[in-house]
Image: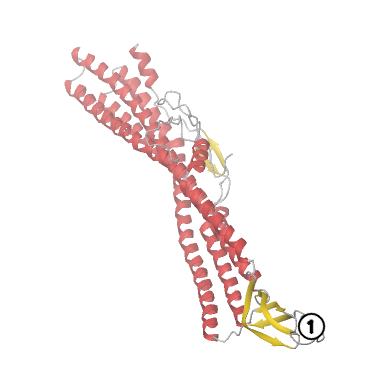
């Protein structure tokens, strides 16, 4: 399974026509989004830049070459000096280069974590849009079934009214209910296009690309306990990890600044080109002297170096406090997401195991009684309306569960393993009504 994906549903065969590069399921949406998202690509480029910066940090200063020409030659016993060549290399105090490199590596790692954060945000947006799109698609299917049932009842009631078996008021009541449900259906159908555009935007695709409608919204039961999910926040959340790494980098920077109290060492070689002596032939006549040099800078401005140390320490302390504040904020968000996920699961169980079966039985029984002439159309409308509301509430709970699970995954920075179950929703009694009509 693709990273961070949690269950999927097959596209509905009767859904809108899909383009040639049709995406089959939620995993496909996530994969397409991760490949095309510009924020992820930008984060990767930032990380590459940070890695190259770290590569530079451990390099010592460039050697220095200098040349001197004696405008007025210096006369010595062994001859006049004409040219002076020097090569010098500065070595920072012991440990400074390694600390600087370590700090840069940590900063690059913090930038790398931002890639994970961008990926998590993309996956969450895709899942959130997918489940909203799936809800709208399934709600449209349920509303259409209700429209079909009401049209059947309209025909039956009209026939009874014409036969003098039913008052005109009942016929009007059916028509009013039909118009109400048709209006709700049109609203849901209008909503489908912006939801499709939202899902396309999450995948960095044109908003008008046609996407298949999922044929169901799965029930997803997390295999991790709430305590395990909450405990995974501190170590898995990319925002917290980035702040922890940045704080460690700042602490390393403080140690690097403390090394600034010690001098850098510069080693050098000087070569002086000397001509032959003009008079006589002394020992070592015309020899070119070679001079080895060593020099130190003097770290005289202690106030500046103290300020550099305090700056790094303050930055480290600030990042640690930011980490604490971010953990408190994200922990509260996690508790809220856990509650919403738990509440969605409770509503799913309530509708699936209790309210929907009872309401389905009530509608089927009322429909049988109506067809036999023993029940008024008003009772049937009430039963149909209640079932429609419960079915839509059930679908809403299924979509909410998937969205809140995606939110928790983005908070802990990993996929939550789930047991996925199908959750078909249909209108009972519709086939029976169609059979009676035939």
Expressed as whole percent of the image width and height from the top left, the position of residue 365 reads 37, 24
Q: Residue at x 51, y 65 (%)?
A: 323
Residue pictured at 60% horizontal, 71% vertical: 252
Q: Residue at x 82, y 86 (%)?
A: 283
Residue 122: image location, x then y, percent? 47, 46
Q: How many marks?
A: 1
At 69% across and 77% down in the image, what residue appears? 268
The colour scheme is secondary structure
Position of the N terminus, as image quadrant, is: top right
Q: Is residue 366 left or right of residue 236?
A: left
**Residue most extreme to the right:** 283
Front residue (pair 54, 324): 54
Would you call the spot at circle 1 few (<14 residues within 10 Å), some (14-19), or many (20 or more)?
Answer: some
| Residue at the outermost front position | 279
- Can residue 314 be seen in the rendering of this structure? yes
Please indicate whether residue 243 sits to the left or right of residue 65 in the image.
Answer: left
Write down the quadrant of residue 232 in the picture.
bottom right
SS under mark 1:
loop
Residue highlighted by disc 1: 285
- Residue situated in front as seen by the camera: 291 or 399: 291
């Amino acid at each position: 399974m693709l990273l961070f994906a949690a269950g999927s549903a097959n596209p509905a065969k009767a859904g809108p026509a899909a383009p040639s590069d049709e995406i089959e399921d939620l995993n496909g949406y996530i994969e397409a989004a991760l490949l095309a998202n510009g924020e992820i690509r930008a984060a990767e480029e930032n990380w590459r830049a940070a890695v190259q910066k770290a590569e530079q940090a451990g390099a010592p200063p460039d050697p220095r070459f200098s040349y001197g020409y004696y405008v007025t030659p210096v006369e010595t016993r062994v001859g006049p000096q004409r040219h002076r060549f020097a090569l010098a290399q500065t070595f920072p105090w012991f440990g400074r280069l390694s600390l600087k490199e370590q700090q840069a590596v940590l900063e690059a790692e913090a930038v790398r974590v931002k890639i994970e954060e961008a990926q998590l945000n993309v996956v969450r947006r895709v899942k959130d849009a997918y489940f909203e799109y799936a809800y709208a698609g399934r709600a449209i299917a349920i509303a259409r079934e209700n429209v079909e049932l009401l049209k059947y009842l309209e025909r039956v009631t009209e026939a009874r009214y014409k036969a003098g078996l039913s008052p005109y008021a009942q016929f009007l009541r059916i028509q009013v209910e039909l118009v109400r449900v048709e209006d709700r259906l049109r609203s849901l159908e209008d909503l489908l296009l912006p939801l499709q555009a939202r899902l396309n935007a999450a995948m960095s695709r044109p908003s008008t690309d046609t996407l298949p409608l999922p044929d169901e919204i799965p029930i997803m039961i997390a295999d991790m306990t709430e305590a395990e999910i909450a405990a995974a926040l501190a170590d898995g959340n990319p925002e917290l990890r980035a702040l922890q790494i940045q704080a460690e980098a700042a602490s390393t920077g403080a140690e690097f600044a403390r090394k600034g109290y010690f001098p850098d060492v510069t080693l050098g070689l000087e070569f002086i080109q000397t001509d032959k002596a003009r008079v006589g032939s002394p020992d070592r006549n015309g020899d070119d002297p070679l001079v080895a040099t060593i020099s130190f800078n003097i770290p005289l401005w202690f106030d500046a170096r103290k300020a550099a140390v305090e700056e790094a320490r303050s930055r480290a302390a600030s990042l640690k406090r930011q980490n604490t504040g971010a953990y408190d904020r994200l922990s509260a968000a996690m508790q809220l997401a856990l509650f919403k996920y738990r509440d969605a699961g409770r509503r799913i169980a309530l509708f699936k195991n209790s309210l929907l079966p009872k309401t389905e039985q009530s509608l089927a029984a009322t429909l049988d009684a109506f067809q036999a002439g023993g029940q008024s159309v008003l009772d049937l409308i009430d039963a149909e309306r209640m079932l429609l509301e419960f079915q839509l509430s059930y679908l809403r709970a299924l979509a909410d569960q998937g969205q809140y699970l995606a939110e928790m995954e983005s908070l802990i920075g990993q996929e939550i393993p789930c047991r996925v179950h199908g959750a078909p929703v249909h209108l009972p009694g519709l086939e029976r009504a169609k059979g009676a009509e035939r």
